[in-house]
Amino acid sequence: QKEVEQDPGPLSVPEGAIVSLNCTYSNSAFQYFMWYRQYSRKGPELLMYTYSSGNKEDGRFTAQVDKSSKYISLFIRDSQPSDSATYLCAMSLMTTDSWGKLQFGAGTQVVVTP
Amino acid sequence: GAVVSQHPSRVICKSGTSVKIECRSLDFQATTMFWYRQFPKQSLMLMATSNEGSKATYEQGVEKDKFLINHASLTLSTLTVTSAHPEDSSFYICSARSERGGTDTQYFGPGTRLTVL
């Protein structure tokens, strides 16, 4: 079983809809949670960063962390065709021997159709 | 946000040659940088952790003699693929660890696409 599970999609939504993405994880020691967006043939771009349970909002993006359920989500409101990309969740342990290392989900491909 | 650059963005080389890829943090200092490899439609695979002024730490299964990493300064890490073979063809991405603004995360470079003929 992978430490971080993420549905690879593709997830297709019409323009203006809410995109809902999620990841589950097995290691309760994960402390920091991130969402990255990756366009084809480009490096990942950091979208959201959280370290506590609850919601965090930034513009059209909302990140949600539920540590008790080991479940994180990313919501994109008013989706645009330019949001079409692969979204990767990532998390880190921040222990001495894994300091700074990220565990990535497989990435979910999102397609927003005009 | 923090900016990380990579050079070159694309390289094609002959089998048996060596290729050097540079990773630079442009507006912050990074004591730690990471090197990843990504195959088409797959997630990132961590290859090694590069610490400024010390030897890199390689993940299990990654040949340290084949993938030489040097982190000579707080803003530059290099990955050299030695005696490259076609199976080394991949998308190589670096990231730099940043602790700015009370966060502790990684900012990624744009990637380098290596094709070995």
Image (cartoon, coloured by chain):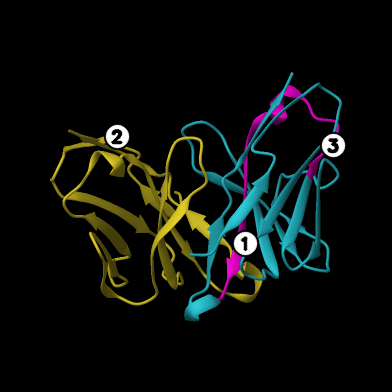
Please tell me whether residue A88 is drawn above or below residue B25 in the rendered image.
above
Is B89 part of what is drawn in magenta? yes
Would you name the residue on which mark 2 appears? A10
Name which residue type carries label 2: Pro
User: Which quadrant of the view contains residue B38?
Assistant: top right
Give the extent of the magenta segment: B80-99
Q: CA distance from mark 1 to mark 2?
A: 29 Å
Chain A is which colour? yellow
Q: Secondary structure at mark 1?
A: strand
Is B60 part of what is drawn in magenta? no
Q: CA distance from mark 3 to mark 1?
A: 23 Å
The circle on residue B82 is: 3
| Total residue callouts | 3
Please tell me whether residue B20 is drawn above or below residue B104 in the rendered image.
above
What is the x, y in percent for residue B83? 86, 31
Would you name the residue on which mark 1 appears? B96
Whether labels 3 and 2 belong to a single chain: the reply is: no
Q: Which chain has been coloured cyan in this picture?
A: B
What is the x, y in percent for residue A40? 45, 35
x 63%, y 52%: residue: B5
